[in-house]
Image (cartoon, rainbow, N blue to C red):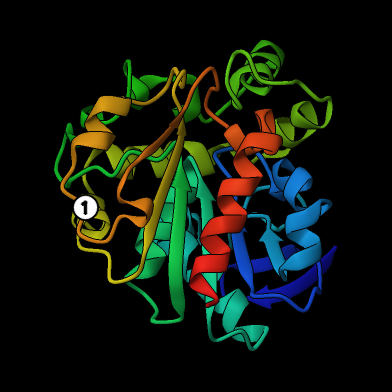
Amino acid sequence: MKFVQTSHGKIAYQDTGSAGFPLLLIHGNSTSHEVFRNQLNGKIGQSHRCIAFDLPGHGASDDALDPDRSYNMAGYGDVARDLMEGLGIDRYAVLGWSLGGHIALDLSAQTDAICGMMISGSPPITQGKGAINEGFEGDIEHSLGSKQIFNEEDIDTFAHVTCGPGAPYDPFLQKVVARCDGRARSLMMAKLACGVGRNQQELAINSKVPLAIVNGAEDAFIKNDFIAALDYQNLWDSKVHDLPGIGHAPFWEAPDVFDPILQRFLNDLSV
C-alpha cells in the first residue's frame, strides 16, 4: 500500500506499476480496494497499470476530514481526481463497481482525463427525491447500506451479501465492513436519495467517452431492464452486458468471465 495526502484526508492506494494503459478502480459501499484483487493480481494488473484506492472512511484511508464534503459522489470523485493528478496520470480508464460506478460517472464531469468508463452494478439515476428508486430493487434508501451504526449482526450480514448473495465470501470482507466510517454510508445515501449532485443518467446517456456497462444478470440489487433500456449515445459494444448466472459483483464472482470483457474494452481504448 502507498499513501497520499489530499484535502479529504490521507488516501491509501495500490499501484501495480505495470507499463500498460492506466486503469483506475473504484470500489463499492463499505468495502475497499481489495475487492479487485483478482484483477490487481491477475493478467489485468500485469498488462495495465492498475491503481485501486480506498475511499475516505474505508480500508486503510483516513476518515474524511469534512464528512459532509467528502461522503458523496462529487466528493469521492474529487478524491479520485486528486489522486490521479498527484500521480501525474493525465489519461486513464475507470472501472467503478456499485457505489464506485456512480462515482465514476460524477468523475467524468470533473475531468477530461478519462478516456473510457466501465460500470458494474450502478444504475444511472436522475436527480430529485425518490429518483433512486428508478434503478434499484427494494427500499435502498432505508437499507442496510444506508445505516450509520452497525452492530455485529449487521457487519456479518453486509459482509456476506455486499458482493451478492451467491458470491464467494472471504473473511477480509468482515474486516473492511467493520472498519468503514458509518457516516460514509448514511451521508452518501441520504444525499443520493434526495437528488443532491449531478444527474448521473444524463452523464451516462451523453457520455463523451465510451461507456461499458457489465452487470450480473442475477444482480439482486439493481433493475437490469431499466439500465438496458436507456438510450446511451456512446455505449461500448452497442449493448449492456448482462452476464448469465452472475450477481452483483461479476469481477469478484466470475473473473474468468468478466476479465476478458474488461481486457477487450481496455484494448479498444488504447488503440
Q: Specify the farthest residue to the top.
A: 153
> Is 223 rendered above or below residue 118?
above
Q: Can the viewer see residue 56?
A: no
Q: Residues within 10 Å of mark 1 (few under 14, many from 20)?
A: many
Quadrant location of the N terminus in the rendered image: bottom right
Q: Position of residue 237 (x, y in %)?
A: 37, 52
The residue shown at (50%, 37%) is: 185
Left or right of 146 in this view: 191:
left
> Is 61 rendered above or below residue 127?
below
Q: Position of residue 95 (x, y in %)?
A: 54, 55
> Is 267 rendered above or below residue 255?
below
Element on which disc 1 rests: loop
Number of on-image labels: 1
The residue shown at (73%, 21%) is: 168
Q: Which residue is mark 1?
A: 232
Q: Position of residue 190 (x, y in %)?
A: 33, 38
Left or right of 101 in this view: 105:
left
Q: Amino acid at mark 1?
A: Tyr
Q: Quadrant of residue 85?
A: bottom right
Residue in the foreground of this view, choosing between 213 and 35: 213
Q: Quadrant of residue 18?
A: bottom right
Q: Position of residue 203 (x, y in %)?
A: 25, 60
Left or right of 231 in this view: 39:
right
The residue shown at (22%, 41%) is: 194
Residue in the foreground of this view, choosing between 33 and 251: 251
Q: Can the viewer see residue 146?
A: yes
The residue shown at (32%, 44%) is: 239
